[in-house]
Image (spheres, rainbow, N blue to C red):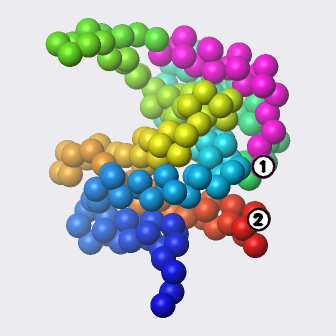
Amino acid sequence: MKRTTISDKLQEIAAAIDQHGSANLTRLAVFKKWFEVSRRLSSFAIFIADRASKQKKKTTKEAEELIREVRTLLADVDVFAPVIPREAATKLLISLRAFQNEHKNIPWGAVRIISDHNLYLIECGLQIYLGRGDTPADGYRLAADYCENYDWRYGTGPNGPSRRRIEEIIDFVHHVEARYDH
């Protein structure tokens, strides 16, 4: 009997999107076990930060400047074995948090207002890379945040454009496993 891999499980999520238009977000929890192997989580975090920095989206001048800083920081970084100067990454993380530091009070507490999802993904990726929230559950949350998409027909979760992102992650997983697991 063939062992089911994370790639197989991610392919099943992509197939569910093809068949039903969406998939349950919690199916991405398969990452928790995968991230228990050293190197994978920090590599994935920088992979997502890099992908988010390359998304084309109309934004503000301040957000564009932050994206340029991210691209400069990650320009020559090997996402499969990232080595990023801690001081520069920490400085950029502080700038990213300050950019989206607006909160709104709601009946059960305060929530943070995220105006630029890509900058948020970059922030989370750098935070994980720097070891400030670097558990397998944090990696799962980053994967879910990257793949989640709002579509009025299906609500939030992996749907439509999420399929392409899941395929990107499958390709990443194959590269990581080929590089370190054989």
Q: Residue 33: where, in percent of width, then height?
A: 51, 57
Q: Is residue 152 above or below residue 58?
A: below
Q: Nearer the viewer, residue 33 or 66?
A: 33
Contact, mark 2 vs mark 1 (Cβ under 8 Å): yes
Question: What residue would you read off at disc 2?
Answer: 179
Q: From the viewer's perspective, is residue 110 above or below residue 129?
A: above
Q: In the image, residue 60 lies at what x, y percent?
A: 51, 19
Left or right of 127, for residue 15 = left
User: In the image, what residue type sits under mark 1?
Assistant: Ala
Q: Magenta residues?
A: 81-100
Residue 104, horizontal then vertical, whole percent? 30, 10
Write the residue at 71% across / 16% down.
Answer: 91
Q: Quadrant of residue 22?
A: bottom left
Q: Going by the image, does 134 lie left or right of 12? A: right
Q: Between disc 2 and disc 1, whose residue precedes?
A: 1
Q: Secondary structure at mark 2?
A: helix
